[in-house]
Image: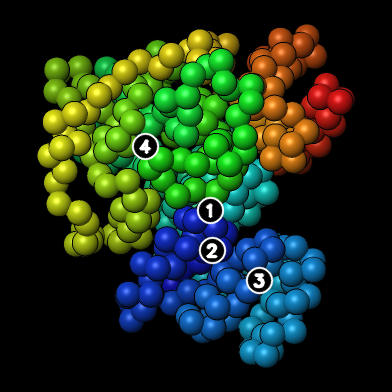
Amino acid sequence: MKKKIAILGSTGSIGKNLVNILKKDRKNFEIILLTADKNYKELSKQAKLFKVKNIIITNKNSYLKFKNIKFSHTINIFNNFNFLNKIFKYKIDYVMSSISGINGLEPTIDIIKYTKKIAIANKEAIICGWHLIKRDLKKFKTIFIPVDSEHFSIFYSLREKDISNVEKIYLTASGGPLNNTPKKKFKSVKISEAINHPNWKMGKKISIDSATMMNKVFEIIEAKKIFNLNYNKLDILVHPASYIHAITKFNDGMIKIIAHDTNMRIPIFNSLYDKQKKIKTDKLNLEKLNFLDFKKVDTDKFPSIKILKKLQNKDSLLETIIVLANDELVNLFLLKKINFNDIVNTLQKLMNMKEFKKYSQKKPGNTKTIISLDNYIRKKINKITH
């Protein structure tokens, strides 16, 4: 019997990777739902290929354009996520949640009850709403798998291991597009330079997060939440080759090093199948293994890493503010309204403001609280930067 799945954010890089895997194994899977925001053309190709009966496309103009496509009358087309109860009459087997940004928070939480397993690639959902996700995973007995290469590697290394036996976990960082760029040139970094990642094909937003190394700040916060660890058990190592994704050192002296090709297809593939299945990958790269070139992060060059020292082990709304503020600052950089250095400098300035320091003592709230905070933060940043 075919496994029934849904893909939230099927036209993004993670979604496309999953779609390409499914193309080669259509006999074993049935896609119940695909979703996108604006890219209705790519969504229509996917829907036609897999004969998908349910589509959610949140951008109004794209929604209307999709409805004018010839075969659209054979599909249930929705403009928002309020109709999940009409789409799912029973639990499906697998959901990939890969909507980018804070817009992925509510759909991720809302769909947990309808699936046996959820793979989450949305940083914002995990950082801002992990307490809500964790609650519903337990309530609806849904299996969770992280999809980021670093978190999946940690997850893989901890199989059949007690988390209390972990001494330290190291997440690796490529150093991003600016690893070899002198700090003095950061102020004049162009968008084209900041999104030109040497190892990964990613969207603009996450590529810029890699350039500032804010992505590693987020990944440490995610790891702390997902694996229930204190910050002192997590660290970052710069590894330009991106061949090693995580290193776990255990109390018994043993060390697990998880390596795989610089290809998101690998963690996505492994999140999809319940039993180990063969995937075609490159041969063991001895050249990379013989020249791992690990280094500590230069925090003068990448001051974003210093933000981690301001975070407490208990969950707070401050982590949410960091995510929301960074999202708006990256957006302003892409609109050429601020320069590259302003992203981290403004974020640090915001965190030092009295009105935001208090959030370190406030517990994360519900999704409405988070969305409301998002609107407030964006307005505040636009005041600061204008």
What amino acid is labelled 1 in the image? Ser
**Nearest to viewer (mark 3 / mark 1):** 3
Q: Residues within 10 Å of mark 3 (few under 14, many from 20)?
A: many
Residue tagged 1: 98
Residue tagged 3: 40
Q: Residues within 10 Å of mark 4 (few under 14, many from 20)?
A: many
Q: Position of residue 363 (x, y in %)?
A: 66, 23
> Along the polypeptide, which appears first: circle 3 or circle 1?
3
Please tell me which residue lies in front, 376 or 135. 376
> Along the polypeptide, which appears first: circle 3 or circle 4?
3
Vertical placement of 353 versus 250: above or below? above
**Nearest to viewer (mark 3 / mark 4):** 3
What amino acid is labelled 2 in the image? Ser
Residue tagged 2: 10
- In three-dimensional space, the C-alpha distance between marks 3 and 4, rounded to whole angstroms, equals 31 Å
> Along the polypeptide, which appears first: circle 1 or circle 2?
2
Q: Report the quarter where the N terminus lies.
A: bottom left
Q: Which mark is residue 150?
A: 4
Residue 108: tell me if it is visible.
no
- In three-dimensional space, the C-alpha distance between marks 3 and 1, rounded to whole angstroms, equals 16 Å
Q: Residue at x 68, y 61 (%)?
A: 37
> Along the polypeptide, which appears first: circle 2 or circle 3?
2
Vertical placement of 177 versus 203: above or below? above
> Along the polypeptide, which appears first: circle 1 or circle 4?
1
> Along the polypeptide, which appears first: circle 4 or circle 2?
2
Residue 27 falls in image quadrant: bottom left
Marks 1 and 2 close (CB-CB < 8 Å): yes
- In three-dimensional space, the C-alpha distance between marks 2 and 3, rounded to whole angstroms, equals 11 Å
